[in-house]
Image (cartoon, rainbow, N blue to C red):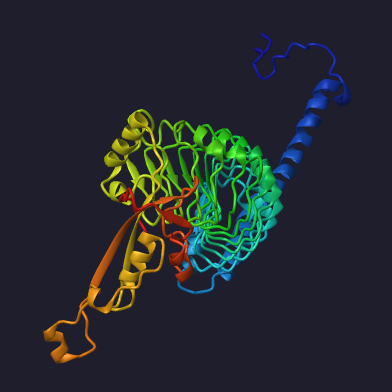
Amino acid sequence: MPPRATSATTPRRRRGPSPPSSARRPAGGGGRGGAAGRGGAAGRGSGSTSGARTAAAPERMEALVREFVELCDRPEPRAEVARRVREAPRERRLDLLGMALMGLPAGLGKQLPMLSALLVNTNSIRTLPDSVGELRALERLNARFNVLGALPATIGLLGQLLSLDVSNNELVELPEALGQLPLLHTLDVHENQLTSLPASLIQLRKLSLLDAHRNRLGALPERLGELPALTSLDISTNLLRELPDSIGHLKTLITFDVHANQLVALCDSIGQLACLQKLHASANRLVSLPSIAGMVSLRHLDISENVLAELPTVTNETALSLRELLWKGNPLQRPPVSVANQGLEAVRRYFDELERAGATISWSARLVLLGDGMAGKTSLQRGLFYGTPKPTHVDARTIQPTNELRRVDSRATQLDITTLTLRAAFGGARHGVGGGKASAEGARHGAFGGASVEREKPLMATECP
């Protein structure tokens, strides 16, 4: 019996001749394998480059940290500065308020392009680096209370910027590039040394607040009124002598502050600001005011410390929303000071009555003669009244020394005030008696300050100083 075949000796079924090794791997497979191999090599190369970049990023950040630390003028805040700079990429915010910084690193914008807020106020920074323009995500830049002398033109590249505060610096001008900030709604440049504002500001269609008080502005851009969203404008404490008429086009303006300038008048177009609620125009040289009838929202009006003879007409028909009227420090005639001192409601009643009864011109005045005894007051009074010199006899004088005073001082006399009520004919002039200086020649001709005297109908009128 032949030996039984085992599995070890059982021949395998052949599927055909084995192809050569080169043919065993089709081109596609070889390509894939080669590609895979090359991919693996490439992957290893890319991994090395990525690793190098990853390794380089912390090094660049640490270099930036060292630059910030070196720019600290005092050692105390250096550790805190380093900590905040390291955390800035994660927080997207860098707050270095009051860290005694003398400047900012030149590569700030390249290393921290993700920042949305940069707060470097209350330091001693003299310039902002040009790389600040690379902070393309920046929405808020606060650099107030530094010693900045200028702003870089690259600031116009901050297309996402909403708020810019560079107040309390030493800026003498602003770059025209500011007009390239389409989303800017707050611009604060107060307390600098600006003599003008760039004309490009009118391109800031979103600007809501413009604060430029305490500068040296001598004029404003003629087209400033083309800012369609402006609600608050503060140009107080400058050197302005006039305002552009375009101010009346600021239809959304709510608060307008022009106090402490050199304004002689406010442009008439201001009366068209229907949304205006607060107008501060004190401490100027105003001699007149425009009508406020169109300011239907006006609640607060400050015109104190000017040279106004008349207040704007305030009645129960106009300026209904007005709640506060400040006028002190003006030589008021209309309404009289005695009326204005009683408050806003008294002023309203005055103008209401004036509209109902109408206005008349008074040609009368009161003349008060003051002087020492025996100075000739009575003689002057008689001369004015009779139109010819009539010296008073010694025994007829109104000032006579008393016996009691004679015992103390033989030259002493009683104090006396002699008044004369006059009615003057001026030939259409609106000035009261006493508009000029009295003279002996005037007294001889029955005139005082250009006024002739009518003794038939004496009347009481405006008191002359």
- Picture residue at 74% right of the left edge, 44% below the top: 45
Q: Is residue 57 above or below residue 39?
A: below
Of the pair 444 and 206, the residue shown nearer to us: 444
| Coordinates of residue 267 in the picture (x, y in percent) | 56, 42
Q: Which image quadrant for residue 106?
A: bottom right
| Coordinates of residue 55 in the picture (x, y in percent) | 64, 54
Q: Is residue 52 found left or right of 332 in the rendered image?
A: right
Q: Is residue 9 found left or right of 299 in the rendered image?
A: right
- Picture residue at 50% right of the left edge, 68% below the top: 78
Of the pair 283 and 69, the residue shown nearer to us: 283
| Coordinates of residue 5 in the picture (x, y in percent) | 67, 13
Q: Inspect this view and state whether residue 157 appears.
A: no
Q: Inspect this view and state whether residue 248 appears.
A: yes
Q: Is residue 189 found left or right of 374 in the rendered image?
A: right
* Quadrant position of the C terminus in the picture: bottom left
Check the image and name the residue furthest to the top: 1
* Quadrant position of the N terminus in the picture: top right
Q: How many marks?
A: 0
- Picture residue at 80% right of the left edge, 23% below the top: 29
Of the pair 232 and 438, the residue shown nearer to us: 438
| Coordinates of residue 211 in the picture (x, y in percent) | 52, 49
Of the pair 266 and 35, the residue shown nearer to us: 266
Check the image and name the residue furthest to the left: 404
Q: Which image quadrant for residue 201?
A: top right
